[in-house]
Image: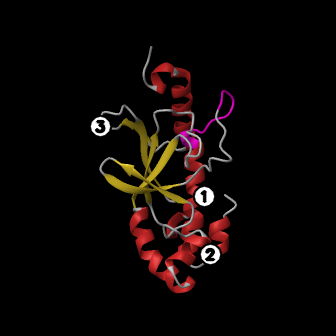
């Protein structure tokens, strides 16, 4: 019996590769060198076009792909911005948000607990990193006919990046950034 999802379900693996090659052909698949056996895609996107930032992203499959653990954000694929690092952006934004809303507690009440909307923190190797949240556990459903894929998670991440950049540039309000209608 195969231990990893991509060994036990080669059709799913082939579907993942085909979707990524079709929609995001510049991304390449690799295996983490941490002994976990987890696969990841890595590549760059620039959702806002010429004037926007270039984002170097890793899309990391969890071992339970395509299923997500109940109550866990992000689905079964984690989106880690390698450059720019969300942690760095969030640390720059939090003092500005505290200035606007009066205190850290008020920022948390409004939804800006980490300094950016729709992110979560998790350990990656020996570091705590901030990930783009592409799936809210209350809306995520996994099964034979519905699951997350790297291509769909990356599509949601690109939408998040566009809204985030617009928010950072002052083009949309805090409320729109938080609500997002992602």
Q: Secondary structure at mark 2?
A: helix
Task: Please name the predominant secondary structure of the magenta segment in the image.
Answer: loop
Pointer 1 with pointer 3, Cβ within 8 A? no
Q: Quadrant of the N terminus?
A: top left
Report the Cα–Cα distance between label 1 and label 3: 29 Å
Q: Secondary structure at mark 3?
A: loop
Among the two numbered marks 1 and 2 on one chain, the one whose residue lies closer to the N terminus: 1
Residue assigned mark 3: 33
Q: Residue at x 52, y 44 (%)?
A: 24
Q: Residues within 10 Å of mark 2 (few under 14, many from 20)?
A: some
Number of numbered callouts drawn: 3
In the figure, residue 118 lies in which quadrant? bottom right
Q: Residues within 10 Å of mark 3 (few under 14, many from 20)?
A: few
Residue 169 visible to the viewer: no
> Which residue is situated farthest in the top direction here?
1
Work out whether 14 lies above or below 94: above
90 inside magenta stretch: no
Residue 132 visible to the viewer: yes
Q: Which residues are magenta?
A: 143-151
Work out whether 39 lies above or below 89: above
Q: How is the image coloured?
A: secondary structure
Residue assigned mark 1: 159
Report the Cα–Cα distance between label 1 and label 2: 16 Å
Residue assigned mark 2: 174
Q: Quadrant of the C terminus?
A: bottom right
- In-front residue for pair 109/13: 109
Q: Position of residue 124 (x, y in %)?
A: 36, 49
């Amino acid at each position: 019996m195969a231990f990893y999802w991509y060994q036990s379900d080669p059709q799913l693996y082939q579907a993942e590769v085909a979707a990524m090659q079709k929609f995001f052909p510049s991304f390449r698949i690799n295996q983490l060198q941490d002994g976990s056996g987890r696969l990841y895609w890595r590549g760059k996107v620039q959702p806002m076009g010429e004037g926007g930032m270039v984002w170097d992203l890793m899309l990391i499959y969890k071992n339970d792909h395509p299923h997500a653990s109940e109550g866990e954000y992000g689905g079964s694929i984690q989106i880690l911005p390698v450059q720019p690092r969300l942690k760095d952006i969030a640390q720059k934004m939090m003092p500005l948000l505290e200035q606007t809303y009066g205190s850290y507690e008020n920022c948390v009440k409004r939804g800006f607990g980490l300094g950016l909307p729709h992110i979560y923190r998790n350990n990656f190797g020996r570091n705590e990193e901030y990930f783009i949240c592409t799936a809210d556990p209350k809306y995520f459903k996994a099964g034979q006919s519905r699951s997350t894929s790297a291509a769909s998670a990356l599509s949601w991440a690109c939408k998040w990046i566009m809204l985030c950049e617009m928010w950072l540039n002052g083009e949309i309000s805090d409320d729109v950034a938080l609500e997002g209608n992602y």
